[in-house]
Amino acid sequence: MREGYKHDFLGPGHEVKLPKPGISLQSDILQPPGLPEGEVIIPYINYSLLMSKSTRQALYSAANVDLDKMQPVPSKKGRKWFIDRRVGRNNQIPNYPYQGTLWDRGHLTRRTAVTWGDSVDFAIKASNDSCAYTNACIQHKRFNEDEWRAVELLVSEFKLAKRLTVMTGPVFTTTDRFYIKEFEDYPVRIPSAFWKTVSYVDNNNKLNTSGYIFFQDVPSVKSSKARKRLRLKDMQVTTTELSLWTGLEFDQVLFDSNPLKFYSGPESISTKKHKALLTKDPATLQLNAGITSEDSINKAREKFPLQDFYDLIDEISWV
């Protein structure tokens, strides 16, 4: 049974709702012909996703992961890719761009992230369900098996909790490349980057989230050894950055549980080290204090000017 993503999977008081399309994306949301009118979230086993009409790829895929209930899936089972009839054949990218090319069917929700449940048979069904073409985005082989594998392994080898909420999606921009295998083929839009969030509840009953962006650029395509020297913490971003890149409106708890990264310039250095300068300029003193106060951080996170947000989305999103 395809129950799909559960927003209360992490327990009472820690609900994580699915992202909502921002104003720049609302006209691009696919209404799957196989779902009732108004239902656009497509449920699968242990995950759900939302499709874009223009790219024929998912805007995001969100999964519940229970590492305590992982089941072994035989090597020759659970890997059958399929066209989801609920979505419609023409609304998803089939197998042709991947055949005989260096482009991979890059899982958004990883297959081994959803192969959990009460039996091996159920896990095999979940494994097959993850192989819907709707859950794949076009990724270069080296990127898929290198940088992207690093953050996938973060989930499968997670040490801080056993129950996770994981969201993933592509980043499309105005400078995306397109892949055309043959002259009359429908051009496949290649995501410029991919993002992922991992949320969990720690031993103090506190929700924690980490966010990541990996760019599918020339260096990532050229290299096949980046994962060996990659430091995941260097790829972390704020939820605000994810929202700006994707045009998605994330649940407020993903902002509150994902700490901001701080600018390390002189403004954030203790005022005592700049006493001579700061006492001459009260405004600078106030700026320094504001940057380092928790109240200022929360305001910066939550009070981003709406028009500025829309202007940025217009620049980086493709409608």
Image (cartoon, helix red, strand yellow):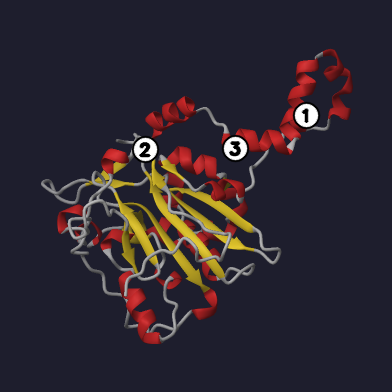
Numbered tag placed on residue 173 in the rendering: 2
Q: Which residue is mark 1?
A: 289
Q: For the residue marked with disc 3, what is the amino acid?
A: Arg
Location of residue 247 with respect to 291 vertically, above or below: below
User: What secondary structure is marked by label 2?
Assistant: loop
Could you tell me the amino acid type at mark 2?
Thr
Instruction: Give the structural element (helix, strand or loop) at label 1.
Output: helix
Q: Residues within 10 Å of mark 3 (few under 14, many from 20)?
A: some
User: Residue drawn 69% across and 67% down?
Assistant: 203
- In the picture, measured across the screen, residue 15 lies left or right of residue 33, that is right
Q: CA separation, marks 2 and 1?
A: 36 Å
Q: Position of residue 187 (x, y in %)?
A: 20, 46
Q: Quadrant of the C terminus?
A: top left
Name the one closer to the observer, 315 or 149.
Answer: 315
Instruction: Return the disc, 1 or 3, that comes first in the chain's sequence.
Output: 1
Mark 3 or mark 2, earlier in chain: 2
Q: Amino acid at mark 1?
A: Ala
Q: Residue under label 3, please give it.
A: 301
Q: Position of residue 276 (x, y in %)?
A: 89, 18
